[in-house]
Amino acid sequence: MAARSVYQAALADLADVPARSRWAANGPVRLHALDYGGAGTPVVVLPGITSPAITMDFVARRIGDLVRPVVLDVRGRGLSDGGGRHTLEEYAEDTEAVIRGLALDSPLLLGHSMGARIAAVVAARARVPVRGAVLTDPPTSGPGRGPYPTPLAAFLAQLDQAERGTDADEVARSWPRWPRREQELRARWLSSCDREAITLTHRGFETEDFFDWWPAVPAPTTLIYGADSPVFTAAAAQEAARTNPAADLLKIPDAGHMVFWDNPRDSIDALRQVLPHA
């Protein structure tokens, strides 16, 4: 089994990112984040299952005039340590440790996919004060709800490509709609994702239920989802509206699960409208 790695070309990408590396720890686990600075409200950004922090750079740049994005390398991705159980509550504990360790005063939470599930748990647990949450296309698979629509084998096949060396053209075969820079970043950074972290997180998509936490997520909360998402479906939207009526739901046209990547203009415009009021 290949070990996770960060190639020199990937590390060089950090020189082009207008953020500085910050570090915090949850016990022995060292956690890395990209802090974009600024005087605005801090926003802790939590990416998806195979998305290191740098892959959210294009979103962070577009909102940096409104807020202070702090994008986390979730445990087992990017420059953060791996190990552990990779459960939602463990990820939430990591996020809480980053908020405390970086002295982020009542931040907003912004999560995509896996990150949206983590944000929901952090907000519902209320172990640290937060101002609100924006959840983007959280997986709603789980016990009795059917499998996650992308099988684990597909994630691991893409990781195999990254470990042997891939490029943007190969990434584009899986993600043809993405902007070219995002395809390039995925090609260079996917190998930094730990195989066990991906495997256990995917298992959690089918053994942990988002709706166990969602009703307890306090306002103000906005849930953004792709109109064509197979992960957060129309039925899920109906259940979400019913079980947490205080939350706002926004549907982004011409977008699947990878909402920001599929339709950057509409999704980030919607996010900008939400953030000052979140």
Image (spheres, grey):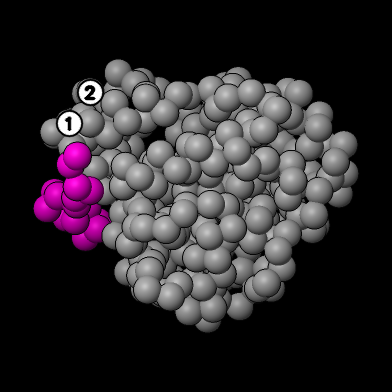
Q: Quadrant of residue 186?
A: top left
Residue 106 in picture, x, y percent from top left: 65, 73
**Residue 209 is a magenta residue:** no
Marks 2/1 in contact by CB < 8 Å: the verdict is yes
**Residue 16 is a magenta residue:** yes
Give the residue type that dot 1 points to. Thr
145 sits left or right of 66 in the view: right
Q: Nearer the viewer, residue 42 or 4?
A: 4
The residue at which mark 1 appears reads as 166
Q: Number of labelled discs? A: 2
Give the residue type that dot 2 points to. Glu
Q: Quadrant of the N terminus?
A: top left
The residue at which mark 2 appears reads as 170
Residue 30 in picture, x, y percent from top left: 35, 70
The residue located at (21%, 60%) in the rendering is: 15
Against 147, residue 17 (above or below) is below
Which contiguous range is marked in magenta? Answer: 1-17
The answer to whether one can see residue 58 in this image is: no
Label 2 secondary element: helix
